[in-house]
Amino acid sequence: MSTFIVQGGAKLSGEIAVKGAKNAALKIIPAAILSADKITINNLPNIEDISRSLELLQNIGASISRHKDVCEIQIDKNIKTELEPKLANKFRASIMFVGPILARTGEVSFPHPGGCVLGAAQRPIDLFLEGFQAMGAAVAWQDGFYHIKAAKLKGCEYFFTTISVTGTESLMMTAVLASGTTVLKNCAMEPEIKALADYLNLQGAKIQGAGTPTIVITGVDSITAGKYDIIPDRIETGTFAILAAATKSSIKITRCNPSHIESLLAIFAKQGIGFKTGPDWLQIYPGEFIKPYNVQTHEYPGFPTDLQSPYTVLMTQARGSSLIHETIYDRRLLFSDMLTQMGADIIMCDPHRIVVNGPAKLYGRKLASPDLRAGIAIIIAALVAEGTTEIENIYQIERGYEDIDGRLRALGADIKKIGTLNL
């Protein structure tokens, strides 16, 4: 198993470029199934979740050519309609293959999708199944597999009782080849959804309203494929901004879209954290005094749950008390116990709320990454801390952040990876 060894206290500076959005890449790969033509994907991040997604796509029947951050995908005429459990169980985003396969072939079988601990127990797929049924599909469970069939998917009206990014994207893709008109209500509004819809529309789909609560899709018989440029990863952008603020460093974040993290930057302005933005860059300036600020996670454009863990670390360095209210994932605040082990003053009010009292002196410890976002938060805490931090289970970090240790070393961080990653 590989481990990160982090020596805290180093002053960071320089530039760090944002990679392509993980959450956009994980949707465009299965979207390739909707067309018989070749798709070229640019700015593809080199991370474990992407490799798993491409592996699953290849398994069902795709020719894939990948070089650095460019990937070409050609879907075979006849594809498998059953997702291989050994592959699908490894990552949550395998659920995104279900809709496109169903739309193209009329049937699909798959195990319950896997992923990190958050996804394993707290992220059901009932919205997906209900949406497929609303389009006329029959859903059955037998021998550890969901079996979905539809002679012909039909347009429908579906209201998401819970706002779901993946649910919105999945049903939007599925409806592209359905007959008639589909109206999706109470949709998620993340930038990745609009980017996906914009691409599909360029290829012949008829999608209106992506990026708003109501999306209308008029089904078409077929779509083509072309070039898809993955948008910058807004979670990386926000994470690096928080890293700079927490370590009181001057860092310029490039190849990003600052407008995608306006909720965080608005908070920075209230906290006295200096920054300047450009069309594709964000400069964070070092400051000695960070004001506390309460946050409540919310769907886009609110404060992202994926930035809550790094933000919690930042609040350990603020002067005063901050209430962190996690409204989306029950387990996401549990990692705060690791910060307490490092010296943070954190009170767990209930599974959804903590109070962080700062500033706190953090000290290096031996820890294990429980999930992707908590893992990157621990790295930030380790860079702030005095002494050495040893972080195990770094697979959970590397599956979402490309070459994170190398990129941080370029900023002056004292971080190294030892051992061999055993997947």
Image (cartoon, rainbow, N blue to C red):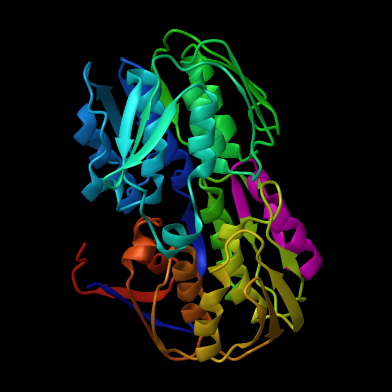
Q: Position of residue 189 (x, y in %)?
A: 65, 38
At 47% across and 25% down in the image, what residue appears? 174
Q: Is residue 69 left or right of residue 180?
A: left
In the displayed structure, 78 sits above or below 24; it is above
In the displayed structure, 239 sits above or below 221; it is below
Question: How many dots with numbers?
Answer: 0
Was residue 296 drawn as part of the magenta stretch in this picture?
A: no
Q: Position of residue 135 (x, y in %)?
A: 52, 23
In the displayed structure, 377 sits above or below 198; it is below
At 67% across and 61% down in the image, what residue appears? 327
Q: Do we see residue 32 in this rendering?
A: no
At 46% across and 36% down in the image, what residue appears? 230
Q: Quadrant of residue 4?
A: bottom left
At 56% across and 42% down in the image, what residue appears? 165
Q: Where, quadrant-wise, is the C terminus in this rendering? A: bottom left
Q: Nearer the viewer, residue 174 or 382?
A: 174
Q: Is residue 374 left or right of residue 187?
A: left
Highlighted magenta segment, given as a residue range: 259-282
Q: Position of residue 172 (x, y in %)?
A: 54, 27
Was residue 280 drawn as part of the magenta stretch in this picture?
A: yes
Q: Nearer the viewer, residue 34 or 103?
A: 103
Q: Where, quadrant-wise, is the N terminus in this rendering? A: bottom left
Q: Nearer the viewer, residue 50 or 146?
A: 146
